[in-house]
Image (tube, coloured by chain):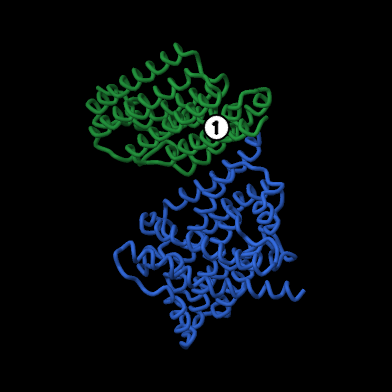
Chain colours: A blue, B green
Amino acid sequence: MILQIGLVFMQLIMLLAFSPFIVGVIRKVKARLQCRRGASLLQPYADLAKLFGKQPVVSSTTSWIFPAAPYIVFASTVTAGLLMPVFISHTPLNFAGNIIALVYVLAMGTFFLILAGLDAGSAFGGMGSSREAIVATLAEPAMILSILAIALTAGSTNLSTIVHRSALLEGVVLAPPAHLMALAAMFIVTLAETGRVPVDNPATHLELTMIHEAMLLEYSGRYLALVEWAAGIKLLVFLTLLVNVFAPWGIATHATPSALAAGVTVYVVKVTGLAVIIGVIESMFAKLRLFRVPELLGSAFILALLALVFFYTLRG
Amino acid sequence: MSESTQLGSQLVDLCSVLLLLSCFAIVAQRRLSACVDLFALQSFFLATTAALVAFLTGHRHIYLAAALTVVIKVIVLPRILRKVIERLNVSRELVMNINVPAGLLICGGLVVVAFFITQPIIPLGYLLTRDSLAIALAIILIGLFTMIARKKAVTQMVGFLVMENGVFLGATAAAYGMPLIVELGVFFDVLVAGLIAGIYTHRLQDAFDSVDTSELTVLKE
């Protein structure tokens, strides 16, 4: 029991402490590719600390949703993080829900962020919210379908079981085409859901192109810190899903100190590698026009659909 | 099925899936030159699949077919198409009969249809390439769809060539390829068809100042 609680806290601390680092890694890679030296990898921590120390300014036209939303967004993202295996194939909140719950707990955070964007009544907030709603609605079917394809290959919708089985290669139906397509679909969804470059530009404050930033425009002080931190954790949650569902090798399958140490090391290396890849992609591609985003997410949906079809037909 | 043939069969599946994916990329692509590049890439995957089948089965004539695929479909035909595109005054296809997101969804449906149709046949097969039959049918249907959905002569031609790739994959999947003499004839046909379509596109460009085939339905004095 104590071991269980210890693991929950370890995973919680891992998520909270590691997410700003990942944001820093992506920024550093982008800066390097632009021949800049870039801010230190620890800069996101300093930003968060600074924001937590500042007094928030809240518009007098807002309702209770505006100050409540950052807490809801943060809590839902962290809950989602605890619903999945991170460095050990055991999931802390295994009793609470499976992979489908994870998707919709994250969606709840998105929903409240959209409401908060509308709440202050600024034109940019409303615009950002409507765009975020488009992206979220289009990304969701692709994500659910690719997750279903993975759940079918492992024979369970329980993330812990999926990761455990594919890490040990037991009872898993090997269908490489289905896996690859689900991976591609999930990667596109990751870029869209976390507001990365082909869909949204996390570094911009240019009015016409903002999606995620537009919703946060009215936030300041600790509210902004919470939302930014939640965005970092959401990115980490998606990267972890990609890494652990599609390449879970090296994850700790039982709670011995040596396995845990190996699991944490492998996890950090894999996620950092994936963050570097995302940084490179952000430097290579331009942001899509908003009306082309449905095409990108449409192709993610088709890929996920094909993954499902191939699972049934190519089993051999 | 032994371990090595299982692995071989999965490799063939993987290659044919890449073929299918490049089909989707062609459907989603608006730039004409990128469509041609994707067609060349698809033909390269086709040649790889054929070479893989030849290696796994020991049928020598499939190697020859693979080599011909590389020469004609990866090198010569894309070069002809690029020459055609250089002369055009458009580089992208902006107006289509069916827009891209709807087209992608329809193609997804076509794949499901193709798999559904071939479902009863596939278990009867005994070749290690039998799963590719469904993918080949899907590629043929998507090629046909590309010809219907697009308006520019160049992309319609790419659609036709994609269909031909599907037929080739189907022949390899169902019967380890056609007899060599038929194969040679088909390649010659495709080459000539490509040349004729190229010349026809030039003439279209000269006559209408556009390669939009929908202009052909309008009477002209």
Instruction: Say which residue appears at 58% left-offset and 72% top-offset.
Output: A14
Left or right, A267 with reference to B155: right
Q: Residue furthest right?
A: A1
Instruction: Say which residue appears at 55% left-offset and 35% top-offset.
Output: B11
Task: Identify which residue, B73 or B180, lies in the foreground.
Answer: B180
Left or right, B157 with reference to A256: left
Relative to A5, does residue B41 appear above or below in the rendering? above
Check disc 1: other Cα within 10 Å, few if <14, some if 14-19, many if 20+: many
Q: Chain of mark 1?
A: B
Q: How many marks?
A: 1
Task: Identify which residue, A105 or A312, lies in the foreground.
Answer: A312
Instruction: Say which residue appears at 50% left-offset and 30% top-offset.
Output: B139
Relative to A57, does residue A161 appear above or below in the rendering? above
Residue A198 rendering spot, x and y as whole percentages: 42, 56
Rendered-image quadrant of the N terminus of chain A? bottom right
Q: Which residue is mark 1?
A: B12
Q: Residue furthest front?
A: A258
Residue A165 rendering spot, x and y as whole percentages: 69, 52
Task: Identify which residue, B55 or B67, lies in the foreground.
Answer: B55
Rendered-image quadrant of the C terminus of chain A? top right
Q: Identity of the amino acid at label 1?
A: Val
Residue A50 rendering spot, x and y as whole percentages: 44, 84
Secondary structure under tag 1 reads helix
For residue A245, what is the image quadrant? Answer: bottom right
Task: Identify which residue, A124 or B76, lies in the foreground.
Answer: B76
Relative to B85, does residue A223 appear above or below in the rendering? below
Q: Residue furthest top?
A: B181
Residue B120 rendering spot, x and y as whole percentages: 68, 26
Left or right, B202 with reference to A271: left
